[in-house]
Image (spheres, coloured by chain):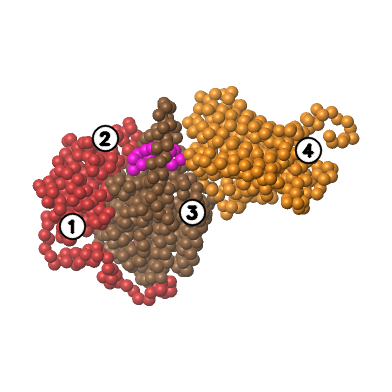
């Protein structure tokens, strides 16, 4: 796969337009993309000011799904909060609980047993695969191809079936407990998981052929929405979006160690371009990497208990802790302030999509309307993650 | 003229033919829509499509959709221009109807055998642009306006490759009349071998591909469906239309697809002609069936591309038309003319 | 039988204890953390401690603190460690300087978040005798967390470095009667949205912010929801009914303990 800087094409296009726009004196049009719009992944409203088909300025209006999580956490006990935060990023819901529970376990000085850690990591990677398979399919839909989303959904079903077999729930498993997990794996799950991962790898190949290697898809995504790495980091863009701009930073490898990632052998994928195609490509590779990681873990999962000794009523000692993890959407972090009660005093939820979307006013200046849709699709945010 | 037991005047025959064409348009749309949009698209996307209505693989689905649309409330946006809003779908369907008038389904089964058939067909098919622009403007909706403006630019831009693709065929056949072109293909021969006549697809393969691409753009189908971009404008210029008027647009879209596929089959695949079957009686009976088969073949190609590719952005679309297709079309005409003169 | 099934499923036959697993990791940060935890009991605390914290700073944190002290000097009020993360509280008038120093000297180019804390304990609507079981019981006196505080409101932020893989949490105090802080927008463009949210949730104005308007809430919203004296509206509309119609767990009798916190059973 050739990776070339296509920045010159941008310059040529602006040069060609410069002569035309001089004579015509047209007014601006304000267009409301959303809050009900198929391209905005939920109730995001983009107020764009257009000059013909070119965006002059864009202002995202969020908050249509604001549920007040940070206020709610002050009135809930820790196990109740686990149910709540499941729903922040609802596509990879298992991954939302992991940092919060690690924070609570750090404060209580409890360590979940190794088998529980392995199963947690496997389920986290499975939820990453589930989220990314949906992205790989529906990114094709954003640029107009009708078939890829069906292939993405079809192969995602395998992963959801696996999660359901282990936890009982496809989307919101509620499987984590402070100190471990609710239940052990069912009999035969490990072999099912292995064959499921083979299906995932095949599906990645299919979607790569169908979407990533399609000339029209490349024409629609290359050099669209380029995020320079320093600007991206300044806005707080994280996860695959920042790695697609060439920043080699993955919290599973570089952050404070959590779950069993220190024992695993995996590659962190980056791409130098920083455009929408790079973001698609990075997520494609990360899906494959996640499947390989799951197979690694299935080979090494230890036996043992799945729950540490935890008191019946959970009172977390006083303290503050900050835990950040590499969620599928980016860096998710919880800053938990506890005062020794059964519930926290204050929880600051740092969600990835909030920062990913905050770059839109900067990113959308001067692009065409179809490019707006491409960029929104490639940044891959979830409304629950933005609005909390 | 056909021989009837009873002596009927040309007016009656014209009326009968017109009624038949009027019936064929929605029927053709339904056949195309069901086979390709509902069933082929479903199977390509690993699902089944409608299976219940009508019992056998849901063949009644579109008829049921038609009934549903007819009984819906007629809603118009409050700020829309009412007369133009109501007329726009009619303009699109009328342009489709006018194209059907010259497509022959048999030696005598044509409503009007114009000497300038090809020229007329392409001319009236561009009337649809007016209908689209009317719909977009009268909807009083910014998304519809964006879609209509995109459509206007696109449909006008792709008229030229369509025309240039056809000029090669006209040069080879020596006539612009569609019946004449069919007969030229039936009676012609490929380098002396007249086993299957001379379907112009072999000599004009470039023209065929060009025609298909340009027809795809004229029908605003992916990869050229910017005006109707599902994920951006949600039906574009048709977004404010419901019920019976939307049904008209739907029939117009698939009816035009049928018409363009019919044109492609007639110009490149030999139309209703079966090689070595010259008896007019047999040809009049088998002709429509043969034409339908060839139309389905061409439509299969068009819809296959539609369900696979993403869509091109507006400026990329225009670049493809002006910088790529038109030079190829011109080169095609040059080569065809040179070879025709030489041989 | 459950143990047999587990052994059947997993490949490895031996049980791995928690300490062995920690020792087996070769990630430098993890080893460092393990060493720091192990040394905690032996080395006396070397830095100023916030209430309840007794962890010394590890090497990374000392490096960060050293660089901050070189640049900010008097601006730093307190610093402490919270589970491997450095928390530094600065004077309110050095808040923007702290951001610039973080970006330049600490090479922290990545903004994680900016938010606020309200240390005042929430007023309880009912009391235990009244049977109000709607929320966990919090201590009623005002205490401050790691790094301390001079008053009720604080602004805190976390920045990280994508190249050096370290991060620091900065805190500053906000005057309750006139809540305002300096804006970080010029240093970290992402601060735009974070500060808007902080303003609408806590009422802390940010000087130098281009347009401080509502982010999540409608424009006509009154009040600052995340402050502790702002009630949870759902409880105001309909008071918590307490435990009603509790279905006993399988095996328990109908008059099992109805403790105030109705949490799910954990693997009993």
Residue position for label 1: C61
Disc 4 and disc 2 on one polypeptide chain:
no
* Residue drawn at (43%, 71%) of the image: C9
Report the side of B183 relative to B146 (left or right).
right
Pick the front one: C27 or A227? A227
Q: Give the range drawn in magenta.
A: A359-372
Q: Position of residue B128 (x, y in %)?
A: 61, 32
Read off the chain for label 3. A
Mark 3 secondary-structure assignment:
loop
Residue position for label 3: A213
Mark 1 secondary-structure assignment:
helix
Report the side of B319 relative to C245 (left or right).
right
Q: Quadrant of the C terminus of chain C?
A: bottom left
Q: Position of residue B290 (x, y in %)?
A: 75, 46
- Marked residue nearer the N-terminal end (2 or 1): 1
Q: State which quadrant residue C97 falls in.
A: top left
> Which disc, if any, is residue B109?
4
Pick the front one: C46 or C257? C46
Crowd rating for badge 4 (residues with CA inside 10 Å; few <14, some 14–19, many 20+): many
Crowd rating for badge 1 (residues with CA inside 10 Å; few <14, some 14–19, many 20+): many
Read off the chain for label 4. B
Question: What colour has chain A?
Answer: brown
Residue position for label 2: C210
Mark 4 secondary-structure assignment:
loop
Q: Quadrant of the N terminus of chain C?
A: bottom left
Q: Which residue lies furthest to the left in this view?
A: C74
Question: What colour has chain C?
Answer: red
Q: Nearer the viewer, mark 2 or mark 3?
A: 3
Label 4 to label 2: alpha-carbon separation: 73 Å
Disc 3 and disc 1 on one polypeptide chain:
no
Crowd rating for badge 2 (residues with CA inside 10 Å; few <14, some 14–19, many 20+): few
């Amino acid at each position: 796969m050739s990776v070339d800087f296509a920045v010159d094409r941008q310059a040529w296009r602006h040069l060609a337009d410069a002569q035309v726009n001089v004579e015509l004196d047209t007014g601006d049009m304000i267009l409301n993309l959303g809050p009900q719009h198929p391209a905005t992944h939920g109730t995001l409203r983009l107020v764009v000011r257009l000059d013909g088909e070119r965006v002059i300025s864009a202002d995202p209006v969020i908050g249509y799904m604001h549920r007040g999580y940070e206020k709610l956490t002050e009135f809930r006990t820790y196990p109740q909060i686990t149910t709540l935060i499941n729903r922040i990023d609802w596509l990879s819901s298992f991954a939302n609980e992991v940092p919060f529970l690690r924070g609570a376990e750090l404060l209580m000085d409890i360590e979940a047993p190794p088998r529980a850690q392995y199963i947690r990591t496997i389920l986290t990677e499975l939820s990453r695969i589930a989220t990314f398979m949906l992205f790989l399919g529906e990114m094709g839909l954003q640029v107009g191809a009708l078939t890829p989303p069906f292939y993405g959904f079809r192969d995602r079903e395998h992963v959801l079936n696996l999660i359901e077999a282990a936890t009982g729930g496809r989307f919101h498993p509620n499987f984590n407990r402070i100190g471990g997990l609710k239940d052990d794996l069912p009999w035969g799950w490990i072999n099912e998981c292995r064959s499921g991962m083979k299906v995932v790898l095949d599906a990645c190949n299919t979607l790569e052929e169908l979407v990533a290697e399609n000339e029209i898809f490349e024409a629609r995504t290359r050099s669209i929405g380029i995020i320079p790495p320093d600007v991206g980091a300044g806005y707080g863009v994280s996860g695959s979006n920042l790695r697609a701009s060439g920043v080699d930073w993955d919290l599973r490898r570089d952050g404070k160690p959590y779950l069993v990632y220190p024992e695993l052998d995996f590659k962190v994928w980056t791409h130098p371009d920083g455009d929408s195609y790079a973001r698609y490509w990075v997520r494609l590779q990360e899906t494959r990497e996640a499947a390989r990681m799951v197979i690694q873990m299935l080979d090494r999962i230890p036996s043992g208990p799945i729950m540490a000794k935890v008191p019946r009523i959970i009172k977390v000692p006083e303290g503050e802790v900050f835990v950040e993890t590499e969620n599928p959407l980016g860096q998710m972090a919880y800053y938990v302030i506890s005062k020794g009660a059964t519930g926290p005093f204050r929880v600051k939820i740092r969600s990835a999509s909030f920062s990913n979307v905050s770059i839109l006013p900067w990113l959308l200046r001067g692009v065409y309307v179809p490019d707006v849709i491409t960029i929104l699709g490639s940044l891959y945010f979830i409304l629950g993650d933005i609005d909390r | 003229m056909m021989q009837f037991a009873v002596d009927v005047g040309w007016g009656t025959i014209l009326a009968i033919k017109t009624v038949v064409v009027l019936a064929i348009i929605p029927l053709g749309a339904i056949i195309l829509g069901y086979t390709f949009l509902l069933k082929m698209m479903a199977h390509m996307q690993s699902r089944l499509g409608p299976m219940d209505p009508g019992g056998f693989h849901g063949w009644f689905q579109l008829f049921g959709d038609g009934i549903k649309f007819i009984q819906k409330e007629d809603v118009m946006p409050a700020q829309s221009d009412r007369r133009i809003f109501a007329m726009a779908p009619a303009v699109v369907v009328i342009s489709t109807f006018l194209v059907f008038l010259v497509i022959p389904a048999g030696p005598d089964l044509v409503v009007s055998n114009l000497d300038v058939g090809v020229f007329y067909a392409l001319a009236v098919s561009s009337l649809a642009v007016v209908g689209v622009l009317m719909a977009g403007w009268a909807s009083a909706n910014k998304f519809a306006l964006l879609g209509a403006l995109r459509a206007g630019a696109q449909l006008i831009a792709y008229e030229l490759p369509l025309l240039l693709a056809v000029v090669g065929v006209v040069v080879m056949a020596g006539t612009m009349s569609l019946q004449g072109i069919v007969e030229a293909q039936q009676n012609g021969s490929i380098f002396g071998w007249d086993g299957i006549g001379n379907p112009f697809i072999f000599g004009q393969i470039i023209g065929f591909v060009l025609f298909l691409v340009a027809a795809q753009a004229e029908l605003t189908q992916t990869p050229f469906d910017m005006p109707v971009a599902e994920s951006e404008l949600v039906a574009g210029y048709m977004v404010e239309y419901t019920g019976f008027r939307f049904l008209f647009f739907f029939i117009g879209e698939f009816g035009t697809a049928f018409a363009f596929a019919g044109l492609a089959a007639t110009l490149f695949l030999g139309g209703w002609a079966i090689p070595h079957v010259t008896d007019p009686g047999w040809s009049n009976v088998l002709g429509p069936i043969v034409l339908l088969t060839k139309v389905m073949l061409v439509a299969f190609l068009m819809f296959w591309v539609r369900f696979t590719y993403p869509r091109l952005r507006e400026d990329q679309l225009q670049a493809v038309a002006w910088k790529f297709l038109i030079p190829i079309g011109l080169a095609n005409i040059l080569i065809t003319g040179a070879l025709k003169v030489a041989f | 039988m459950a143990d047999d099934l587990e052994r059947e499923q997993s490949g490895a036959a031996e049980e791995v204890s928690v300490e062995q697993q920690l020792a087996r990791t070769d990630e430098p940060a993890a080893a460092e953390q393990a060493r720091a935890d192990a040394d905690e009991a032996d080395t006396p605390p070397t830095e100023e401690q916030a209430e309840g914290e007794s962890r010394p700073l590890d090497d990374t944190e000392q490096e960060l603190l050293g660089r901050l002290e070189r640049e900010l000097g008097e601006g730093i009020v307190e610093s402490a460690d919270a589970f491997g993360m450095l928390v530094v509280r600065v004077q309110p008038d050095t808040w923007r300087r702290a951001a610039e120093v973080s970006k330049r000297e600490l090479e922290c180019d990545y903004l994680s978040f900016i938010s606020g804390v309200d240390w005042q304990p929430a007023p309880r609507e009912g009391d235990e005798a009244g049977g109000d079981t709607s929320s966990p019981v919090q201590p009623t006196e005002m205490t401050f967390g790691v790094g301390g505080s001079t008053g009720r409101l604080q602004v805190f932020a976390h920045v990280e470095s994508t190249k050096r893989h370290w991060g620091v949490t900065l805190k500053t105090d906000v005057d309750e009667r006139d809540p305002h802080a300096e804006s970080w927008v010029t240093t970290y463009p992402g601060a735009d949205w974070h500060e808007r949210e902080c303003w609408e949730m806590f009422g802390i104005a940010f000087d130098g912010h281009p347009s401080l308007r509502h982010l999540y809430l409608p424009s006509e919203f009154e009040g600052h929801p995340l402050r502790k004296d702002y009630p949870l509206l759902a409880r105001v509309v309909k008071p918590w009914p307490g435990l009603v119609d509790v279905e006993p767990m399988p095996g328990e009798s109908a008059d099992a303990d109805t403790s105030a916190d109705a949490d799910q059973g954990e693997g009993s």
